[in-house]
Amino acid sequence: MSAALVDVLLATYNGSKYLADQLDSILVQTHQDFRLLVSDDGSSDGTLAILQQYQARLGERLVLVPNPFPGKGVVRNFENLMAASLADGVAQWAVFSDQDDVWLPEKIASSLAEMRRIEGDDGSHVPCLVHSDLTVVDEGLVVLSRSFAQYQQMEPATCSPLSLLSVNQVTGCTMMVNRALLKMALPLPAEVIMHDWWCGLVSGSGRRSFLATPLILYRQHGANQVGAKDRGLKTRLRRMFTDGPGVVRRVRGLGRATSLQAQALQQRLRAQGVDGGYVSEYLSWRGQPLWSRVTSYRHYYVGPELDRLSRCLLWFK
């Protein structure tokens, strides 16, 4: 196998409407040294038939990875792919793919060039992650926003391991990781909110780089697992007026989940013998009384001020 082989990890579930578009965009990548690993979560539409058609064209380059526990959701579906890529030890890097996007031709090549740069001479032994911006498009690929980061009011280039504990700014469908990161990330703890967020957290013990150039058309169609939401003040105030209790409930739920996820990261770092002092600091701060957190929440929470303040008021350890 080539030293430049990249595993493309494609998780599918009832994705027949857009799957062929995504597969076609992968097939025309300028970096052709890739293997496509696919794990299906129990599709009941034409997804499997489409995969079989492409497997006839790709042969051994498309591997249908058996999913022993279909129906467990996107996180466990991607974990199945991560484990398969790591287990056979063929590819040194893996990129994550959703079923409904469209990749721009330089997606793999640009990510791999940046990965090799941050790995340097010793990077293959250090958890490394590369991610990029995205162009937000509608069902018909009409551009809604040239930059997902700007659309979501995110600053992924400057976020820190500390700030990632509260807000995920690593978009999974743009992500490339090396084998060292896969080793540290697996198995995914039960407390993991999303697989990409967890990989981003693990990269805090290694190296992470953000490419400001959008490398993916991020399709919005109403059934996205996560999706791009309008985070403008007017829209958010409308949500509060129309569904205030629901908004508060979701914010509190995310607060509990981020605390549990941070605790899982703390345990993983300890087990690996890696310094996790910043995680301990964060969890200790989360346990402080409100009056104390009010004076310092901007240090721990990033993003729009309304988001930061709501976390301070509604999140506890």
Image: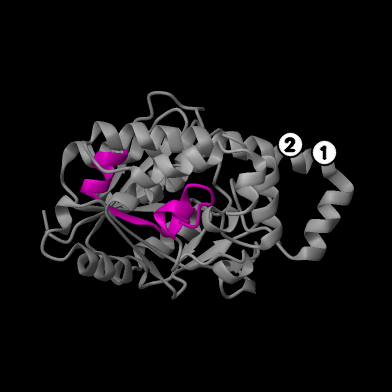
User: What x and y, as percent, mark residue 137?
Assistant: 61, 67
Above or below: residue 276 compared with residue 129: above
Q: Nearer the viewer, residue 138 or 166?
A: 166
Q: What's the residue at 64%, 66% (across, down)?
A: 140
* Magenta highlight range: 160-186
The residue labelled by disc 1 is 245
| 179 magenta-colored | yes
Q: Residue at x 16, y 66 (%)?
A: 120
Q: Position of residue 89 (x, y in %)?
A: 16, 42
Vertical comparison of 152 with 65: above or below: below
Give the residue type at disc 1: Pro
Callout 2 crowding tier (Cα within 10 Å): few <14, some 14–19, many ≥20: few
Residue at 59% over, 49% down: 226
**Label 2 residue SS:** helix
Horizontal placement of 235 versus 174: left or right? right
Q: Residue 98 in the image: state x and y as whole percent.
A: 47, 51
